[in-house]
Amino acid sequence: MRRWSRIPAGIAALALVAAACGGGQEEAAPTGGGGLPGEGMKACQVTDVGGIDDKSFNATAWAGVQRAQEELGVEGTYLESQTQDDYAPNIQAFIDQGCDVIITVGFLLGDATKEAANANPDQPFAIVDFAYGEGEIENNNVLGLTFATDQAAFLAGYLAAGMTKSGKVATYGGINIPPVSIFMNGFWAGVQKYNQDNGTDVEVLGWDAAAQEGTFTGDFEDQTKGRQVTEEFLAEGADIVLPVAGPVGFGTTAALQDSPEDDWAVWVDTDGCVSASEFCPLFLTSVMKNMDVAVFEAIKQVVEGTFEGGVYVGTLENDGVGIAPYHEFEDDVPQELKDAVEGLRQGIIDGSVSADYNDYL
């Protein structure tokens, strides 16, 4: 039935990103229609503090559960974490309910997930944005879903450097943790690559790649802080802002809407023109992590009895990460710049281009 052995990175097959999110503190959506393989099974998601309807991180993972409801017939349910103190109790609640797989969403749930997995060695877990070292999970019953988002952010940084009118772009995060800083590193590196290729000197505000320090709001909830930081960036001359802060990023969209200038944002985690379509005119592109597909694949493995712990890595090559279409900016991005971004995408895939920030220091 279940096999607890380490799998190689990138084993899951990926598809196109699914959309939308659910509502309510805990939700189950029965589907079924006869003979679906997951009927009678339950997939349970524990959110980070951003909430299920953050139109970004948690919502994208939940879309993977929703897809499993529709295609596999599982029952999907979630618990929202209001504070970090809720992580362990929410996980335990789902263990007590007999969930067939528990999906924890976010780096900050790493310790609580590890403790629960080791205390319940026959319980399958998947965790978004976290991977454990050899031997940390005693029975290898956790699949870490990780993403090389620096690859996609590199493309967005190159694009932003090519589109800025002021010569200044900016980025900030919620908390300085690896799943946040990886976006900022990639974005910064893409700007440096553009400068190298074009003899320009586009500046990145908000992130010092050498020091691995920058501008952070301190949480993923307070949109007022996102607005304040963005207004400060705009005052310094930035005209494109990449917020890596979940719902805090809506403070950025509010600031841009009120800006008298033609300023833009780059969204993260999902295609902002799908998840937050009301702000689509502000989104030059989005740096996407196809978390929904990775979550679906983890659930599918449990349903099929082939679940294995270990680590999955989403990359440009396996479509685990990418940048969104230019949507309303399709006619504004010069064809030469579009071609350059596509060339870089292919170069990262074939290894001829590095997205590693260390190579641009």
Image (spheres, rainbow, N blue to C red):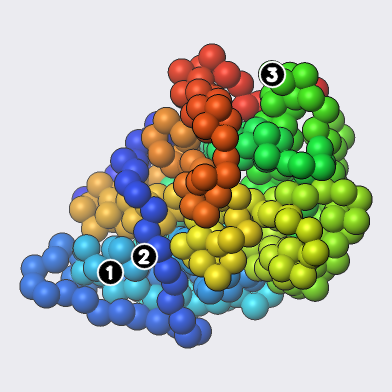
Q: Residue 173: x and y, percent?
A: 75, 54
Q: Quadrant of residue 308?
A: top left
Report how far apart the C-alphas of labels 1 and 3 lie in the structure.
47 Å
In front here: 8 or 226? 226
Mark 2 — residue? 65
- Mark closest to the chain's N terminus, 3 or 2: 2
Q: What kind of element bears circle 1?
A: helix
- Is residue 45 or residue 326 the one in the foreground? 326
Determine the residue located farthest toward the top in the rendered image: 352
Residue at the spot x=72%, y=32% of the render? 191
The residue at which mark 3 appears reads as 197
Name the kind of residue labelled 1 in the image: Gln
Residue 184 coordinates in the image, percent (x, y): 71, 42
State which mark lies toward you, 3 or 2.
3
Picture residue at 35% right of the left edge, 80% below the top? 28
Report the Cα–Cα distance between label 1 and label 2: 6 Å
Q: Report whether residue 94 is seen.
A: no
Number of labelled discs?
Answer: 3
Label 3 Cα crowd, 10 Å radius (few <14 / some 14-19 / many 20+): few
Asked if marks 1 and 2 touch (Cβ < 8 Å), the reply is yes
Residue that mark 1 sits on: 69
- Asked whether residue 181 appears in the rendered view, the answer is yes
In the image, residue 56 lies at what x, y percent?
55, 62
Amino acid type shown at disc 2: Val
Query: Helix, strand, or loop for circle 3?
Result: helix
